[in-house]
Amino acid sequence: MVKLVAFLKRRDGMTLDEFYEHWEGTHGPLIRSTPELARHLVRYEQHRRVPEPSWAGTKGYDGITIQWLDSVEAFSAFCAEPKYAELIEPDEERFLDRDSLIWMITDEPIVTIDGPTTSEVPT
């Protein structure tokens, strides 16, 4: 299992509300409703930036997406789908500042630290 993690900025001239509306209401559903694309994904996540405090992340980034895939080859196959070029690339141009996109494909975690569950936290 690999994960694509991408930091996203909205395109110039778009409000934050417009960005979230398009990302969550159009872009995600477009991927989900296109079988040629959805079949390559194990999981697709969208994470909004928390609005406060202002120091809670690099300035200018509006959210991250995490896409879970079986392999790097599955990611390559996703991007090679004709529907990706037909639907996803033009849609990204509508709402993303693609020049500022930061992304990385990661492997399974090497180190994980799990905190106590709520029931284990002393009161």
Image (cartoon, rainbow, N blue to C red):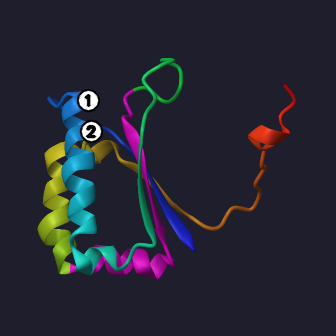
Q: Nearer the viewer, residue 109 or 118?
A: 118
Q: Which of 62 and 44 is in front in this view?
A: 44
Residue 84: assigned label: none
Picture quadrant where residue 7 is located: top left
Q: Where is residue 121 in the image (x, y as percent from the top left)?
A: 83, 34
Quarter of the image with the N terminus in it: bottom right
Say if 66 sits above or below 59 in the image. Answer: below
Amino acid, disc 2: Tyr
Q: Position of residue 19 (x, y in %)?
A: 23, 37
In the displayed structure image, the side of residue 66 where residue 96 appears, left or right: left
Check disc 2 and report the residue beneath it: 20
Q: Residue at x 48, y 18 (%)?
A: 54
Number of residue marks:
2
Q: Nearer the viewer, residue 79 or 42?
A: 42
Q: Residue at x 26, y 65 (%)?
A: 31
Check disc 1 and report the residue beneath it: 16
Say if 16 sits above or below 55 in the image. Answer: below
Quarter of the image with the C terminus in it: top right
In the displayed structure image, the side of residue 69 where residue 114 appears, left or right: right
Q: Give the range drawn in magenta.
A: 60-81
